[in-house]
Image: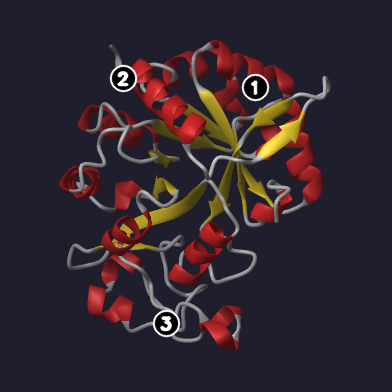
Amino acid sequence: MNKKLLAGAGLAFTLLFSPLSQAFATDTTGDLRKVDNVAHRGASAYAPENTIAAFDKAVEMKADYIEIDVQRSKDGKLVVIHDTTVDRTTDGSGRVGNLTFEELRNLDAGGWKGEQFAGAQIPTFDEVLDRYHGKIGILIELKAPELYSGIEENLAKKLKERHLDKPQNAKIIVQSFNHNSMKKMNKLLPKVPIGVLTSSSTDTTEQALQEFSTYADYFNPSYGIVTPDLVNQVHSLGMKIGSWTVRSQETAKFLLDVGVDAIITDYPDYVDPRN
């Protein structure tokens, strides 16, 4: 069985039986349709992004996945932070890759969001995997992997150590805007679903989509370029489609109506009617 069939079967089994997969939308015929509710950098509307507080909130809000961003410290530690610098989301400054793990760990990554979050630390990839795998799906974005030579091998090693390189063991997806990096990840982790991120309409041509389908299981565009035809094209090539970043109920409704498979949102309650 090829990678796509394996991944699809694993994900289908997980989605069918997971108690977390309860995010529903009503289509025009009145039937219930399932869509994955992905908490963007955790439930980042309610807690500081890419922190344990945001990920715990996502679990509390019954999201299906947390989306995390992985980079590497100067001394080789995989850490979870979005920007390639620490300036916006911590009390420090400088590039992530130029700071040691100890320097990164000593930063306050939560105070900017509110006093109640002061002292929150930048998590390690190890911590996130150990705390959440088996509890909630994890959508892993390799952030600017071109800055970190060999980070694909680093990430694959961490997953294999925990036997998370097989989709039946946990809901794990790896994605990036760097499509060459994802081709590499597909070879390193042939049983793990791969996603390609884009905000460019040039990546939505028939030729581009066909190329993505040779190594990716998910095509994940920004919602501004999503159309019903694009959703149909992606599905016809055997891929799923997850769109980002939802910060309004109107956008969530639009994406539900056009039939995407996953909605990546700062507000899990905009997707899941149980909240």
Q: Position of residue 73 (x, y in %)?
A: 26, 66
Amino acid at pointer 1: Val
Residue hosting label 1: 231
Query: Foreground residue, 5 or 215?
Result: 5
Is 114 above or below relative to 206? below
Which quadrant of the figure contains the C terminus?
A: bottom right
Q: Are marks 2 and 1 in contact (CB under 8 Å)?
A: no
**Image side of residue 103 versus residue 69, left or right:** left
Checking the image for residue 3, the label placed there is: 2
**Sequence order check: which comes first, mark 3 or mark 2?**
2
Q: Position of residue 24 (x, y in %)?
A: 68, 37
Is 179 above or below relative to 105? above
Distance of label 2 from label 1 (alpha carbons): 22 Å
Amino acid at pointer 2: Lys
Residue hosting label 3: 92
Q: Mark 2 against mark 1, which lies toward the viewer?
A: 2
On the question of residue 100 being in view, the answer is no
